[in-house]
Amino acid sequence: MNNDISKEQWNELDQLIIENKKLQFNQMYQKLTNCSVRDLIIIKAERYRHLKEVCPEKFKLTDEEYWDGYYS
C-alpha cells in the first residue's frame, strides 16, 4: 500500500472498488501517486482481494462478474 495516501483517501478509493467504479479508482489513484498503469492494476487487484477478505458482504458481484472485460 502506498504510504503517501491518507487513511481518508484510502477510504474513498476503497469505496470506489466496492462500488465497481474502476475507472474512477484509476483516475484518483494515478492522480495521487503518478504510478504506472502496470502498478495501478497490481495495486487495485491487491486492494480488491483485501477488501473481499475483510468485508465480503459489501460486494454484490462475484469475482468473475467484477473483473469481466477489465483486462480486455
Image (cartoon, helix red, strand yellow):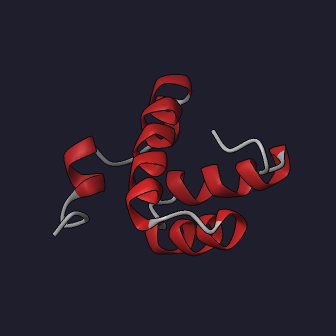
Work out which residue is located at the far top of the displayed protein and give it: 53
Above or below 31: residue 55: above
Residue located at (32% from left, 48% from top): 61
Name the quadrant of the C terminus: bottom left
Among the 4 quarters of the image, the one containing residue 7: top right
Q: In this view, does 57 lie to the left or right of 5?
A: left
Q: Which of 29 and 62 is in front in this view?
A: 29
Position above or below: 60 against 9:
above
Q: Where is residue 28 in the image (x, y as percent from the top left)?
A: 64, 70
Against 46, residue 71 (above or below) is below
Viewport quadrant of the N terminus: top right
Q: Which residue is drawn at 62% across and 49% down?
A: 14
Q: Report the residue at 21% width, 63% height from top.
A: 71
62 or 47: nearer the viewer: 47
Residue at left offset 53%, top offset 35%: 51
Q: Position of residue 2 (x, y in %)?
A: 68, 44
7 vs 13, left or right, is right
Q: Quadrant of residue 38?
A: bottom left
Horizontal arrangement in the rendering, residue 59 relative to residue 8 (left or right):
left
Q: Position of residue 24 (x, y in %)?
A: 55, 73
Pick the front one: 68 or 57: 68
Count of marks overlaid on the render? 0
